[in-house]
Image (tube, grey):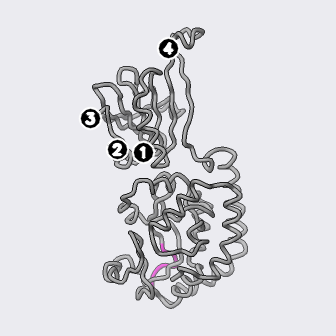
Amino acid sequence: MSSEALALSENSGAFASLATRNGERTLIIGSGADLRLNGRVRRIDDDHAPAKVETIAISSSASPDALKEIVLQHGIERICAVLPVGRCSMLETVSSVARELGLELSVQLKLASEFMPSRKSGQGELAFELFRHPANRFPGRFMKRLLDLMGAFVALAVLAPLMLVVAAAVKLTSSGPVFFLQPRVGRRRRIFRMIKFRTMVADAEELRREVAHKNHARGISFKVIDDPRLTKVGSLLRKASIDELPQLFNVLLGDMSLVGPRPIPTWVADQLCDTRYHRRFSVMPGMTGLWQVKGRRQDFDYMAERDLDYVEDWSLWLDVKLLAATPSAVIRGEGAH
């Protein structure tokens, strides 16, 4: 599987290159005279596979807004700055952008020989990492994934009979598939197909424009109370949140977590204007989270703020508390339509 690395030079002859390799898009920022693009891409990604490079023009004095545009346009997932110790003028801009968008940032400072006298090459490197979320670091990542796997397996074992009955009810009461698969935006803004029991008529997506005037959600969210596209069985499934249960398979596949920001549809993500909301993509999306437990208010800004609260305050204990609070939130049914 290939990935892309975008390399941005800091000298007056600035350039950007798109290199394809290994499943992750990385923005590499460095001095044009010293970057050695192909070698740097291999070292940073810990892989010796060659990189395919495409060069594009870009300003070396890019503003934060310009850098954010580059990151979002190319789907950058991580930033690595490779700079001589005396040429770190871009780091302030780079770090602010990485922080706002929730990107991992690695820094490699190239030290001159006087700082590393024992090295025969005459130059050494000081490497450090910033902004990797604790949920993506070991042991947090391992423990969270273990909780997801154990919880999903137990839930599927207990709920399998109910899910079989629901699947039969969906199939027998309306035409169309049992499951509804919708493209959603996951961690690092990667697209995956979220699985739900189908609660609407088979052509509901095509009919969305016809009910757009009934949207009662605030912001860029979309929610219609008493949606005419709902089937009778689907309405019951929505009220009890049973339609969400197949997402346990998304958890097993590693697309989702039991707890995290709610994955938003791609067409909603395309409308994001406030770039700080992209920080919600720095962690795995979840089946439940702060927004669900606090009442599922149909207001995108409110939901996004709760997602950012989760990202900022994450701990394994917070995941456990939110899982424990979810059944009572489902029973209350606030915001479920």
**Where on the picture, by quarter, is residue 270?**
bottom left
Disc number for residue 76: 1
The range drawn in magenta is 175-180
Lower position in the chain sequence, tag 3 or tag 2: 3
Asked whether the residues under the numbered discs 2 and 4 touch, taking CB atoms below 8 Å apart as contact, a structural biologist would say no
Q: Earlier in the sequence, mark 3 or mark 4?
A: 3
* Residue 112 marker: 4
Label 1 is placed on what type of residue? Answer: Ile
CA distance separating discs 3 and 4:
29 Å
- Judged from the image, the secondary structure of the residue bearing numbered disc 1 is loop
Circle 3: residue type: Ala
Residue 270 colored in magenta in the image:
no
Looking at the image, is mark 1 or mark 2 earlier in the sequence?
2
Task: Name which residue type carries label 2.
Answer: Ile
Percent position (x, y) of residue 315? 67, 54
The answer to whether mark 1 and mark 2 are in CB contact below 8 A is yes
Q: Neighbour class for label 2 at 10 Å: few (<14), some, many (≥20)? A: some
Q: First in sequence, mark 4 or 1: give its number.
A: 1
Task: Find disc 2 in the rendering and name its residue.
Answer: 70
Q: CA distance from mark 4 to mark 1?
A: 30 Å
Q: Which residue is mark 3?
A: 57
Is disc 3 placed on a helix, strand or loop? Answer: strand
CA separation in Å, label 1 and label 2 = 8 Å
CA distance separating discs 3 and 1: 17 Å
Mark 3 vs 1, N-terminal side: 3
